[in-house]
Amino acid sequence: MIMFSVKPVFITILSLSLFLALILLSPSSPFSSLSFTSSASPKGKSEIWSVRRLVEWRPCKWWLQGHLTPLPAKSNGYIRVDCYGGLNQMRRDLCDGVGVARLLNATLVLPKFEVAAYWNESSGFADVFDVDYFIQQMTGFIKVVKELPPEISSKEPFHVDCSKRKGQYDYVESVLPALLEHRYISLTPAMSQRRDRYPQYAKASLCQACYIALRLTRSLEKKSSELLEAIPKPFLSLHLRFEPDMVAYSQCEYEGLSPASMQAIEAARVDRKPWTGEVARIWRKRGKCPLTPNETALILQALSIPTNTNIYLAAGDGLMEIEGLTSIYTNVVTKSALLTGEDFTSMHGNTKAALDYYVSINSDSYMATYFGNMDKMVAAMRAYKGLYKTLFLSRRAFAEFTYHGLKGEKLMQALWKAHTDDFVMGRGSALPDCFCEFKL
């Protein structure tokens, strides 16, 4: 009978196991590219767009079939929507105004764009949008006229203050009597509308106006198409907001900015002094402080966006500290660099903003550092077109993580998880007023 000791055999097997483990886990090993790294780590991972989504937003059926609800035979009068601010704020006002006009069974007069105070220009609705196309696409949803009947055309509209009118019954009880009395009124819808309380035929008119009926003029669409063609493909459209007035309005303070940036911010503050102490910390943790270009670049890296990505910078004039982005992402282009000629230099703020909007709704992917009027419009329009590579960078998450001292790889992992959670669930992808959740 042959006798042998178990102990030496066990030691030999253990040694071989450790040896094989070292080979497999070695960075130089051909096996090290297999899935040994955690899915929470951004290192070596495909960019965020490769993550499978669970929720998408698509146009609601009641909107797409909204024209099937017949318009009343007789109109209660005429409404002109007076729109203020930048292009996308005016667009929002117009959309809300269309919903109000349909709610009150009114005929819509072409809107008035009050842009002089904002852009220092005088371009109107017809300078940006195709009027005939707008009227045609609104057929069946609401009646739109270019001109008033003779008995009304000589009069100025009776202005109705709608600053506190938000819901269906506010307008029916307070605005409809003025419409019936004067037959021609003007209004600017309140900023925080309760569109969810509108009947579906009114909401459908709003949605139709916002996402289908508003097409750029032929000349502006041609210029926008030229710009789109000139951008290297594929590309990410990045709406970055870090202008002096934006920072001043936020009442946030930043360390490490250049003297020129600090001077520009101070000049824009007027009486809006920055928060200090505990209030400043709470304000920043609530996500109220705009991301700097350098912070934006860090988040893009955390989301595994390659540094050689072609980026179109959808931004206005006066963007500060842009080197914080371009020193890391070197393939950044702007409309002013791609378009030349007198026709571009003579463009005003509204028409330039229209270029950014057109490029952003047609880009391969879209990211924004803010959730403003343009971002809401772009995200919803991209959802309408079936383009789902859309993401809003989280100022709140960035502030929360840095407040708790996260740095390096831990910060990158936390940013990856926060943003992938948003992307997977489709948060912010579209405005639910016109879009319905669709689970994949």
Image (spheres, helix red, strand yellow):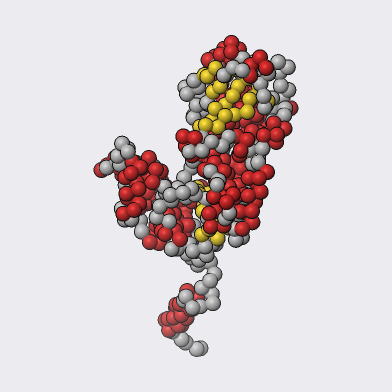
Tag count: 0
Tell me if 69 is positioned left or right of 88 in this view: right
- Visible residue check, residue 366: no
Q: Residue at x 67, y 27 (%)?
A: 146
Horizontal and vertical percent for residue 317? 46, 49
Q: Residue at x 56, y 40 (%)?
A: 377
Q: Residue at x 48, y 62 (%)?
A: 329
Return the residue found at the far front: 342
120 up-or-down from 422: above or below: above
Q: Quadrant of residue 82?
A: top right
Horizontal and vertical percent for residue 318? 43, 49
Tell me if 255 is positioned left or right of 85 in this view: left
Return the residue found at the far left: 277
Q: Quadrant of residue 216?
A: top right
Front residue (pair 43, 349) = 349
Return the residue found at the far top: 181
Horizontal and vertical percent for residue 52? 59, 53
Q: Residue at x 57, y 55 (%)?
A: 340
Return the residue found at the far bottom: 2
Front residue (pair 439, 105) = 105
